[in-house]
Image: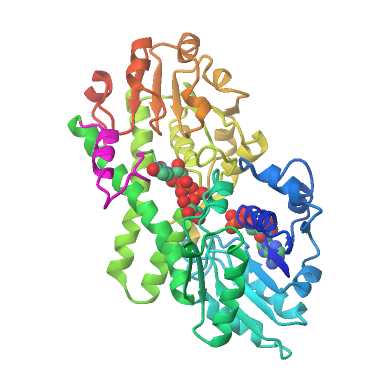
């Protein structure tokens, strides 16, 4: 059997590597239009940082796993074609800032239609709006030359940073297909691939539209949990409760469960924001305004939380950060990844730079080049129309941004330190050394509850931790919400 995956990104690369590892008899080709990306997959420095991934790629590459830019050849030879291209939020035209942009997806679908000469199972791996399978069928069959295409939805639930473990031991594998005999047969073929390593009771076959929608809903539910606990973190700060204790108490109820209850200054990443926007848009297109408004609140609370964090920083530092150096620890959207797509750190940086702070940013996996690219590229404000594209940072603001080689360098001479992602190394820093090298009073703003505030207070820091009892100083300052 031959499998081809169109799209060698954060989803396509790791997923195909694990399929190749677990199914030695299957030939897996991952294709992409990006020459640079494919070259990196074929090198010793993979294009994405993902713990454990390199070993698997090294083991399978050249055996039954290949990476190529020859999209047409591998698609035409494959029995199963996965579409795993990016489906970002539209940045212009109808549905800008809301709907999923299906340009890459459509181009991949058209390639399959153009080059196929034999029957194929085509699998939607990318997250797509519900009923995209119908459009896929239209594109594939409009000039099908008698070829039989079976369409399946097989959304991917891996999280970055734990992708390999998620793929090796998934909670579930979802396969959506049509209820026809051919549809059921195709679903069985894909099920047999996963059955090489996934227990059968974890492979769920459902209707195509349910599978497409389930992916959006799963992400929306996870994001909703975070916004829920984040909203409560604000109440904890106002009342003296501790959000970690509240989360623990609530999460012990087996009906709630403990996961995704870590309060933070806001969630980010390539999935949650984009997928909720897409869900909201689909609801609106179906006339479900109240349902759309309900889910939109998850994003509103996320924006509230990011802006609340920035206000805490500025107001605690005597309401001015003009010319003050602030160390920013963490730039990727979470630990164990170098991915900066939709990282909430950008919003915090922007907020601090608006008040004319000077930033020294350090992230173990984000290059200076990437960081500058992210801070200067255009961003679409999700709640506005397409005419409101924002340039994230002006050239003047960029002069206030520096990168550091490590946390100590970032904090040297700083007035404040903001901890903005949860890399393990941030837990283990020598905070006494950091304190000694900082201007006094020295502030720490922990946006991820990574450090023990009491230990840092004992060193001499003024500490703000999301949702935790406030320092007398921080508490005494009125913050405009
Ligand atoms: C998510 C889903 O988890 C995954 O199933 C889906 O396939 C893709 O989207 P990912 O975006 O890679 O995965 O990361 P995830 O670990 O879910 O974190 C998303 C964001 O939420 C990060 O910014 C993270 O720091 C934040 N988060 C997560 C919290 O703020 N609190 C939590 O308790 C959990
Ligand atoms: P994800 O996180 O969903 O995997 P990425 O952006 O990391 O998204 O990866 C998607 C990949 O799909 C990119 O490397 C991009 O170059 C590739 N791609 C997009 N459109 C096509 C296409 N028509 N043919 C081949 N590759 C494509």
| Residue 235 image offset from top left, x and y in percent | 22, 38
Instruction: Say whether residue 252 is magenta.
Output: yes
> 265 or 317: which is nearer to us?
265
**Farthest-out residue, left:** 239
Looking at the picture, does residue 224 appear above or below residue 451? below
Confirm whether residue 363 shows in the render: yes
> 455 or 87: which is nearer to us?
455
| Residue 438 image offset from top left, x and y in percent | 47, 13
Left or right of 339? Residue 117 is right
Left or right of 275? Residue 153 is right
Confirm whether residue 381 shows in the render: no
Q: Quadrant of the N terminus?
A: bottom right
Q: Main secondary structure of the magenta part?
A: loop
Q: Quadrant of the C terminus?
A: top left
State which region is magenta. 241-263
Identify the residue at image location x=67%, y=86%. Answer: 148
| Residue 3 image offset from top left, x and y in percent | 71, 67
**Farthest-out residue, bottom:** 146
Q: Answer with the quarter of the image where residue 276 lies.
A: bottom left
Instruction: Say whether residue 160 is magenta.
Output: no
Identify the residue at image location x=77%, y=75%. Answer: 76
Left or right of 128? Residue 9 is right
Q: Answer with the quarter of the image where residue 118 lies.
A: bottom right
Q: Answer with the quarter of the image where residue 287 lies.
A: bottom left
| Residue 38 image offset from top left, x and y in percent | 76, 53
- Quadrant containing ligand 2 reads bottom right
> 114 or 158: which is nearer to us?
158
| Numbered circles on residues, count | 0
């Amino acid at each position: 059997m031959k499998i081809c995956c169109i799209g060698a990104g954060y989803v396509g690369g790791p997923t195909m590597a694990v399929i190749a590892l677990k199914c030695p008899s299957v030939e897996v080709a991952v294709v992409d239009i990006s020459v640079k990306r494919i070259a990196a997959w074929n090198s010793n420095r993979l294009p994405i940082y993902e713990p454990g991934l390199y070993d698997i790629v090294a083991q399978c590459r050249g055996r039954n796993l290949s990476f190529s830019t020859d999209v047409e050849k591998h698609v035409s030879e494959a029995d199963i074609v996965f579409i795993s291209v990016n489906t970002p939020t539209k940045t212009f035209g109808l549905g800008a800032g809301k709907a999923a942009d299906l340009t890459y997806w459509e181009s991949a679908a058209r390639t399959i239609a153009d080059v196929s000469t034999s029957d194929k199972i085509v699998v939607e791996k990318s997250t797509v709006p519900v009923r995209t399978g119908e459009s896929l069928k239209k594109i594939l069959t409009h000039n099908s030359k008698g070829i039989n295409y079976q369409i399946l939805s097989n959304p991917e639930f891996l999280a970055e940073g734990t992708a390999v473990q998620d793929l090796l031991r998934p909670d579930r594998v979802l396969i959506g297909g049509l209820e026809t005999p051919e549809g059921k047969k195709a679903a069985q073929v894909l099920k047999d691939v996963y059955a090489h390593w996934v227990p059968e009771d974890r492979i769920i076959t459902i209707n195509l539209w349910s599978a497409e929608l389930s992916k959006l809903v799963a992400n929306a539910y996870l994001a909703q949990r975070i916004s829920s606990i984040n909203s409560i973190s604000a109440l904890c700060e106002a009342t003296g409760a501790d959000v970690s204790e509240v989360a623990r108490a609530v999460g012990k109820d087996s009906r709630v469960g403990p996961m995704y209850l870590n309060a933070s200054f806001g969630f980010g990443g390539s999935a949650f924001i984009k997928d909720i926007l897409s869900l909201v848009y689909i609801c609106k297109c179906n006339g479900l305004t109240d349902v759309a408004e309900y889910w939109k609140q998850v994003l509103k609370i996320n924006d509230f939380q990011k802006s609340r964090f920035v206000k805490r920083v500025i107001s605690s530092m005597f309401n001015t950060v003009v010319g003050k150096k602030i160390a920013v620890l963490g730039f990727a959207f979470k630990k164990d990844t170098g991915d900066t797509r939709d990282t909430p750190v950008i919003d915090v940086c922007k907020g601090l730079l608006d008040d004319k702070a000077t930033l020294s940013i350090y992230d173990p996996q984000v290059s200076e080049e990437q960081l500058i690219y992210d801070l200067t590229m255009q961003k679409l404000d999700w709640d506005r129309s397409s005419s409101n594209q924002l340039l994230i940072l002006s050239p003047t603001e960029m002069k206030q941004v520096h990168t550091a080689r490590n946390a100590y360098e970032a904090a040297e001479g700083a007035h404040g330190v903001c901890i903005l992602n949860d890399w393990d190394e941030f837990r283990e820093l020598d905070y006494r050394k950091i304190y000694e090298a900082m201007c006094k009073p020295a502030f720490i703003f922990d946006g991820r509850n990574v450090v023990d505030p009491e230990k840092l207070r004992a060193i001499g820091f003024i500490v703000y931790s999301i949702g935790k009892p406030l320092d007398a100083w921080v508490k005494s300052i009125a913050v405009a919400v």
